[in-house]
Amino acid sequence: MIKIFDSSGKVRPISSIKNSLKNNKNQTKNKKTKNKSKNKKEDNKNNLNLLNPMVIPILTLQSEKNKNNDFLNKSIDVILNKPERLTEKWANSLNRWVGSILKMMELDPPNISEGERYFLGPLVIVKISEANINDSYGTPSIIATDDNGWRYYFKTSKAFSFNINDTIRLKATVSSHKDGITFLRRPSNIELFDKNFFCEKNDNNKEKRLQKVIKILGD
């Protein structure tokens, strides 16, 4: 309530009344803002209930392997120490990420031995990355997947000769198998996949054969 009269019973100056009205309005606005902020924080805390139960164990496991990953470290800190900052968008992003990790973990690695060299394909390119600034050779990289969703990672100076969704074949040495991904080295003979390479000219059921094609060829 705005007082019209001062302590002596006289009418207050118009400017004083206006300032009181302005201050009162600001106080109301600040109170609403604080309440809104408080309600938002409470809503964000409730977003913990949106998380897949596997989010925390997968985050913990992955952070041990990637100690300098900001996304992993910040997510763990927010979930455990600052849940009021966990937005619905962030929670959904974590759920999608964990879903992809779990899917990769369910896959069996291809039947190819570490240290051996193979022809691989067809593989579909899903990511092409610039060279890491810490890479002394400055070589860009490619991640490609086979029909089962298993990923293959390799570096090549020819990476940007291709595009996302291109289907390729190559020859490379298997370096190691990790969760859902095989690391390759010394890639060569990288080329766009030609389905006729796997099909005989007189085959009347080429597409069916292509779907069942053996993707790993020996030297």
Image (cartoon, helix red, strand yellow):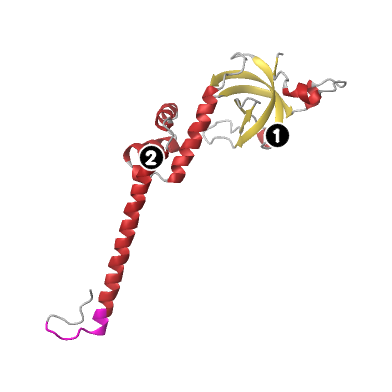
- Identify the residue position indicated by label 1 in the image: 166
Residue 61 placement (x, y as % from top left): 42, 26
Q: Is residue 194 left or right of residue 12?
A: right
Q: Determine if the magenta segment contains residue 9.
A: yes
Vertical arrangement, residue 210 with respect to residue 26, above or below: above
- Frontmost residue, 152 versus 17: 17
Q: Secondary structure at mark 2?
A: helix
Asked if one can make out residue 3 in the rendered structure from this viewpoint, the answer is yes
**Among all residues in the image, which is located at the extreme left?**
8
- The residue located at (27%, 71%) in the rendering is 23
- The residue located at (33%, 36%) in the rendering is 80
Q: Is residue 102 left or right of residue 34?
A: right
**Among all residues in the image, which is located at the extreme bottom?**
10
Q: Is most of the magenta stretch helix, strand or loop?
A: loop
Q: Determine if the magenta segment contains residue 89.
A: no
- Frontmost residue, 174 versus 83: 83
Tell me the crowding category of disc 2: few under 14, some 14 to 19, or many 20 or more residues within 10 angstroms, Cα based. some
- Identify the residue position indicated by label 2 in the image: 48
Residue 67 placement (x, y as % from top left): 41, 30
Residue 131 placement (x, y as % from top left): 58, 35
- The residue located at (11%, 83%) in the rendering is 8
Q: Amino acid at mark 2?
A: Leu
- The residue located at (62%, 35%) in the rendering is 128
Residue 53 placement (x, y as % from top left): 41, 31
Which segment is the magenta one?
8-17
